[in-house]
Image (cartoon, rainbow, N blue to C red):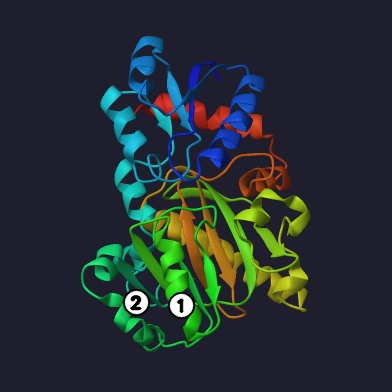
């Protein structure tokens, strides 16, 4: 493919800035390896001036969290008429709010027609607690969800497991909600789902997609939380997922893996993602339960997407080279 001047946009001001800088460094190295001219850019107040002065052929967004996954930088690039790798702003905005995922899935597939199932949830904005006294009704949450304890509490927006906690008893719920609201203006409380934790990388565009080998994730102790994601010694990874984690029967394990991959495709296509995204899933022994959709997933040395790329026998430089070429040919 022709070589291009690629702006790798990273950093920003979200809570996930440090993760983003690591992703940006890895992406820049891979694109340079592929022969492109790389322009590493921090997403700050000088971003527009730099983009207008440097006139890159295409951009790769290595940002995570607010400012990118909410569609802000993709919208800016479309305004500046700079092609980019990744999903369009409306897709980003819908995927950014985890509480919207079940509505998007129902809109695309109706009731019960998708392989992907979203855990039961309650979602409330911070204003409900600050201005309307919602804290006095948190005892109703387990009943509304219908699963009892334990529960998962998390910010409705964002990633890297920031503000995520497991709640095992009523006395812990209020503190967990406040902890999540420290990172966001909306909290999501879900049924706790036990099972095999997986990350599925999907590449392509609706109607023409490929799922890379699913990554199986198991924290050695506690949760796969923010600290665990930064310390490879605290987590075991297998890619592809071990058949024995899915079933003792080899044929059944293969069938289950296909169902998990189908669920990842369903999510990718329901939202209208393009190029590359990651769907986080728990296989609960019977169904694929969807945890999250990352439109701009991590790409650092310890991130899940590069693990899947390696397991697929693909060089990261070759994949990014292809995605950059597609984006350039497509334009906005």
Residue beneath label 1, please? Answer: 173
In this rendering, the answer to whether 33 lies above or below 196 is above
Nearer the camera: disc 2 or disc 1: 1
Q: CA distance from mark 2 to mark 1?
A: 30 Å
Residue beneath label 2, please? Answer: 111
Q: Residue at x 21, y 68 (%)?
A: 131
Classify mark 2: helix, strand or loop.
Answer: loop
Tally of marks: 2
Give x and y (percent) for residue 221: 73, 68
- Using the image as rendered, state which of residue 166 and residue 283 is in the foreground: 166
Q: Quadrant of the N terminus?
A: top right
Give x and y (percent) for residue 61: 46, 33
Q: Is residue 291 left or right of residue 184?
A: right
Classify mark 1: helix, strand or loop.
Answer: helix
Q: Quadrant of the C terminus?
A: top left
Q: Quadrant of residue 329?
A: top left
Q: Is residue 314 left or right of residue 118?
A: right
Give x and y (percent) for residue 53: 36, 10
Give x and y (percent) for residue 175: 46, 72
Residue 117 visible in the current orientation: no
The disc, 2 or 1, on the residue closer to the chain's N-terminal end is 2
Q: Residue at x 51, y 35 (%)?
A: 62
């Amino acid at each position: 493919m022709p070589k291009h001047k690629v702006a790798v946009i990273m950093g920003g001001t979200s809570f996930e800035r440090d993760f983003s800088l690591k992703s940006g460094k890895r992406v820049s190295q891979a694109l340079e390896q592929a022969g492109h001219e790389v322009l590493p850019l921090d997403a700050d107040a000088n971003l527009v001036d730099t983009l207008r002065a440097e006139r890159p052929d295409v951009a790769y967004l290595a940002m995570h969290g607010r400012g990118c996954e909410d569609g802000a930088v993709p919208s800016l690039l479309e305004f500046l008429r700079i092609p980019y790798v990744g999903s369009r702003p409306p897709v980003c905005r819908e995927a950014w709010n985890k509480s919207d995922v079940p509505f998007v899935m129902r809109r695309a597939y109706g009731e019960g027609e998708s392989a992907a199932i979203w855990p039961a949830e309650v979602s409330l904005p911070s204003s409900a607690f600050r201005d309307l006294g919602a804290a006095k009704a948190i005892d109703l949450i387990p009943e509304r969800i219908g699963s009892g304890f334990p529960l998962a509490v998390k910010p409705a927006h964002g990633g890297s497991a920031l503000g995520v906690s497991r709640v095992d008893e009523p006395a812990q719920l209020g503190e967990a909600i406040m902890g999540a609201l420290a990172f966001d203006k909306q909290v999501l409380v879900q049924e706790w789902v036990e099972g095999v934790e997986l990350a599925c990388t999907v590449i392509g565009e609706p109607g023409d997609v490929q799922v890379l080998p699913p990554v199986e994730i198991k924290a050695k102790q506690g949760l796969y939380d923010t600290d665990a994601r930064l310390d490879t010694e605290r987590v075991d990874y297998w890619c592809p997922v071990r058949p024995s984690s899915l079933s003792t029967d080899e044929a059944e394990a293969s069938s289950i893996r296909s169902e998990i991959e189908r669920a990842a495709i369903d999510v990718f296509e329901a939202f209208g993602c393009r190029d590359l995204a990651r769907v986080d899933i728990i296989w609960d022994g019977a169904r694929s339960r969807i945890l999250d959709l990352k439109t701009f997933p991590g790409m650092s040395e310890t991130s899940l997407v590069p693990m899947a790329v390696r397991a697929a026998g693909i060089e990261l430089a070759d994949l990014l080279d292809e995605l950059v070429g597609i984006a350039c040919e497509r334009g906005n």
